[in-house]
Image (cartoon, rainbow, N blue to C red):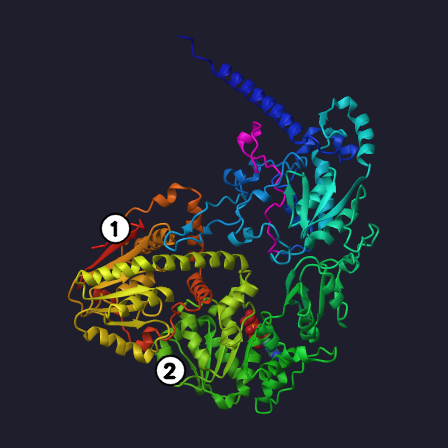
Amino acid sequence: MSLPLTEEQRKRIEENRQKALARRAEKLLAEQHQKTSLGTSVAGNLSQAKQGPSQNFPRESCKPVSHGVIFKQQNPSSSSNYDPKPHNSHSFHLSTPEQAKGIWKKPEEMTTACPGHSPPRQVALIGISPPLAQSPPEVSKQQPLGYELGQGHAQASIRYIPFANPTHEPLAKAKSSQETPACSSGQPPRDVKLEANTAKASTSRQNTSYIHSSSGSATPMPEGRLQQTLGSSLQKAAVTQKGKCVRNGDRFQVLIGYHAELLAVFKSLPSKIYDPDSKTWNFSMNDYSALMEAARSLPTVNLQPLEWADGSSESPSTSSAGQASLPSAPSLAFVKGRCILISRAYFEADISYSQDLIALFKQMDSRRYDVKTRKWSFLLEEHNKLITKARCLPQVQLDPLPTTLTLAFASQLKKTSLNLTPDVPEADLSEVDPKLVSNLMPFQRAGVNFAIAKGGRLLLADDMGLGKTIQAICIAAFYRKEWPLLVVVPSSVRFTWEQAFLRWLPSLSPDCINVVVTGKDRLTAGLVNIVSFDLLSKLEKQLKTPFKVVIIDESHFLKNSRTARCRAAMPVLKVAKRVILLSGTPATSRPAELYTQIIAVKPTFFPQFHAFGLRYCDAKRKQQQKEALILFFNRTAEAKIPSVVEYIMDLLESGKEKFLVFAHHKVVLDAVTKALKRKHVLHIRIDGSTPSAEREDLCQKFQLSQGHAVAVLSITAANMGLTFSSADLVVFAELFWNPGVLIQAEDRVHRIGQISSVGIHYLVAKGTADDYLWPLIQEKIKVLGEAGLSETNFSEMTEATDYLYKDPKQQKIYDLFQKSFEEEGNDMELLEAAESFDPGSASGTSGSSSQDMGDTPDESSLTACTQKKRRFEFFDNWDSFTSPL
Ligand SMILES: Nc1ncnc2c1ncn2[C@@H]1O[C@H](COP(=O)(O)OP(=O)(O)OP(=O)(O)O)[C@@H](O)[C@H]1O
């Protein structure tokens, strides 16, 4: 037995161990760097080389040195929606202890090993561009879709392919890995030239200790010889690299030897594909002009342009003054883009290069070309002309401005002169108190004129403190004949508003002003009624006659359509003739917050949030994901039909007399109804297309029927307001992501009047979207239960569904479902998405509100009376599906 070590000995051993580890890490790092730099050219300057190896670690080491990130930081034209994901899949990130020991991970591994937001002190990043031939890009390896919908037999055709997308690309984005023109992917234009320069700087910073030989190998040099060798090597590196572009089907290929900066350019182009066999890069024609332009900016690159069918070729010396100087080549690729309003007078064509299109643009009198963004813009009045002519170009699809905008800017579109002054007439304010009118400042007067020109419906969004109150009072006073007036304000300013009315409208007797202070006050007691948002939601039921003129102060309080205040205010605004919204901050965090306010002022502007979200909330990616999910949901419905029908028939054959069948998709409702008809089973059907007036009759017919009867009901259109207490069984042929909707549907039978125990059967199919919806519903119910908001426990009797989690990649689909269905407002959006995807599906809630049917649910009195038993039928073996009973 050895003697225990003294404290001093321990300390020394530990110090030595640390030193040895540090030496070893340094050595391994140097070796690794040598390997990965093999073939990398010297692009640095001498002074950097002299600074030694430590300079290989940039100070801002927590920032990835891949080109995409540098681009974002440096390019002022990059916008906030630019995808910050590094586009250079070759950059290596060194950040974990393993990596410090020389174990390198590819970026996709790093995503899990070390999230981008790891504490900076732990992060040391090195960006290395490995040689072209040694490390092909991952682009071509990526799985195009997270899952794939099979074409075969409907029941079993849904097949998963695990997400193998290393960069966590959105589902639908990855769909087009072959062709992703920047404009169609919603990215801002890339300044490839800038990226080339950035790459130049970055490669020079990182590779200064290594000498590139003409054979492509790299040799670490002793410090003493470094300066001399670098000198001659720099001369070698200055030799121009020659190459050419060659057509390759719809794409073009670049034949050229290794050149670090050019390689960086290649990697920055959206359509890049590396062919490991030929060791060449190829691109879509959309990237041709950008690539040529960037290549021209590299002094040591001589890239011969494409030769066209007629033997012509673009001269390498062609000036690079934007697209106007692009080669006179026929348009080879189909280009797609859209018009975007960029000011009150101008719109921009957001579309990639097409020679024909450029020629058309040049025919427009108001054309403007922005060399920075490489975009063309035109006066609105030329919009229709441009679109009409663009439609004649066979390989161009230029989408016009959306109808909403063309309607809003109709006068501008029709203008024939460049006079852009809006024609807002001077309002006749002779009926308004002179004290007020004479005190209006010129900009306030303009605001009042605008409001009256708009028929008294507007959102006045002047900055804070500019006097929105006086303008609002003036606008409202203009419509005094239509009073009583309702003024909805934050409670803290109710009396300030009273004072403002008294100040600016001396003609108004103080007795005529009613400030509502308690829930017992009358909302309509005065000629001017001032109420807080919260009291409005309590008192709105008092309203027998609608207010014709309404002012809403701080209208951003209405941003969330789910809040009680919004629910109370929106119906009031819907029926009012004049709606004066005031807010200095109409949207505080995202454009979606404007939606309810826009709808309040002009309900027809964007009747559905869906269209608004797509255009203004960057909902494209989310939308693509949702569409994939909705497609999955739709296919699930189709796949379940035969088994669902069989289950229902079995129920009937086993003697079950009356029950409800809920489904979401029209195809399922149709299939069930058809089967019941065929078997001559008495049934009713209520879906979104059933008029409100008929619903109660149908319901009664079912309630009073004797013998077999089935109510076929839409989950979203018949989940509330109806009583089917004569049945004691509910069968859910489909799941729905919102458990609240399911529980409401269950309660169609579980309500006052029910004397039996109630059975609820959920038909769940393994291998379909149910795999994800079911745990999602359980999870939601659990959360509600924990918060004391639900007594339901779906999990109690549920067969384990944890098989889903055995494959970690499959979990991501669940995550995607969860994310898409959890986000605020998504139920509504997803419902809309489902409807727009499948127009035949049972529609939302039209005509199904509880008010329509006079439904007064009293949940507390229901739960005690009868028992609800849930049963979950798992269709896990489609082929050998047998009777559930
Ligand atoms: N034309 C005017 N003549 C005299 N005082 C004015 C005039 N316009 C505004 N004011 C005064 O300026 C102050 C700010 O006006 P007001 O409260 O209406 O601003 P606001 O735009 O509603 O601001 P916020 O968005 O912060 O509510 C008030 O004291 C108001 O009386």
Q: Which mark is residue 822?
A: none
- Which residue, as the protein is rendered here, is positioned at the far top? 1
Residue 769 lies, in percent from the top left, at: 39, 54
Label 2 sits on a secondary structure element that is: loop
Q: Which residue is mark 2?
A: 543
**Does residue 421 appear to the left or right of 113 in the view shown?**
right
Q: Quadrant of residue 206?
A: top right
Q: Quadrant of residue 780?
A: bottom left
Q: Is residue 693 visible?
A: yes
Ligand 1's quadrant is bottom right
- Give the residues in magenta: 80-106
- Which residue, as the protein is rendered here, is positioned at the far left? 755
Mark 1 neighbour density, 10 Å: few (under 14) some (14–19) many (20 or more): few
Label 1 sits on a secondary structure element that is: helix
Foreground residue among 1 and 334: 334
Residue 327 is one of the magenta-drawn residues: no
Residue 580 lies, in percent from the top left, at: 52, 78
Q: Is residue 561 above or below residue 141?
A: below
What is the quadrant of the C terminus in the image?
Answer: bottom left
Residue 488 lies, in percent from the top left, at: 46, 76
Q: Which residue is mark 1?
A: 796
**Does residue 849 appear to the left or right of 138 in the view shown?**
left
**Residue type, mark 1 in image:** Glu
Residue at point 78%, 56% (across, down): 327
**Does residue 706 appear to the left or right of 548 in the view shown?**
left
